[in-house]
Image: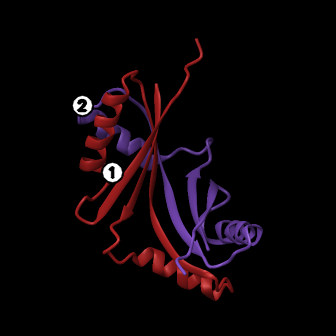
Chain colours: A purple, B red
Amino acid sequence: MYKVEVFVTYKESILDPQGEAIKGAVGRMGYTDIAEIRQGKYFEIVVESDDEAHVAAEIEAISDKLLANVVMESYRYNIQKVEVEA
Amino acid sequence: MYKVEVFVTYKESILDPQGEAIKGAVGRMGYTDIAEIRQGKYFEIVVESDDEAHVAAEIEAISDKLLANVVMESYRYNIQKVEVEA
């Protein structure tokens, strides 16, 4: 079994309105040393498979089709093997 | 300067409707070995400070007040020192 974390963020060239709005709010709260805030989506996915290559291919297919808008967003992921109690 | 990643997810006891909806869609796409999907928010924050303890305290204050709804959500973060080119 594998646990996968997927991080989806706007591409560098794309303005992040949510991040800008939060940065404004944070500045008004008095935190003036915040240089940048970018917001994205985070997914924790548990895959019942013992084949890491299969898991990676599946996560990329799901990310391309569903989790990320690949025109505006990019994603990265990390895969951790999870020991299943017998 | 520090770069901080903040991960905000629903507490375990809270139903994650978005995650459930995505899991349903993924199943209909034929990916039947996906056991669980949880969706959360992900933030990349750049802080112009050289004091890690200050950065941690500030991130916790911002997370508590703005980034997470602490009634339903929990958050964790990791801090990386960023070398600034002279």
Q: Is A17 left, or right, of A73 in this rendering?
A: left
**Image quadrant of residue A3?**
bottom right
Q: Nearer the viewer, residue B58 or A21?
A: B58
In percent of width and height, residue B63 lies at 31, 47
Q: Nearer the viewer, residue B22 or A70?
A: B22
In percent of width and height, residue A45 lies at 55, 70
Residue located 32% across and 59% down the image: B74
Q: Secondary structure at mark 1?
A: helix
In percent of width and height, residue B59 lies at 33, 39
Q: Is B26 left, or right, of A18 in this rendering?
A: right
Residue located 41% across and 24% down the image: B48
Tell me the kind of residue under disc 2: Gly
Residue located 62% across and 71% down the image: A66
Evaluate if marks 1 and 2 touch, with contact meaning CB atoms under 8 Å apart.
no
**For residue B33, above or below residue A27:** below
* Residue placed under numbered mark 2 in the picture: A30
**For residue A49, above or below residue B60:** below
In percent of width and height, residue B25 lies at 58, 83
Residue under disc 1 on the same chain as residue under disc 2: no
Residue located 50% across and 58% down the image: A41
Residue B67 numbered tag: 1
Tell me the kind of residue under disc 1: Leu
Q: Nearer the viewer, residue B18 or A82?
A: A82
Q: Determine the chain carrying the residue at label 2.
A: A
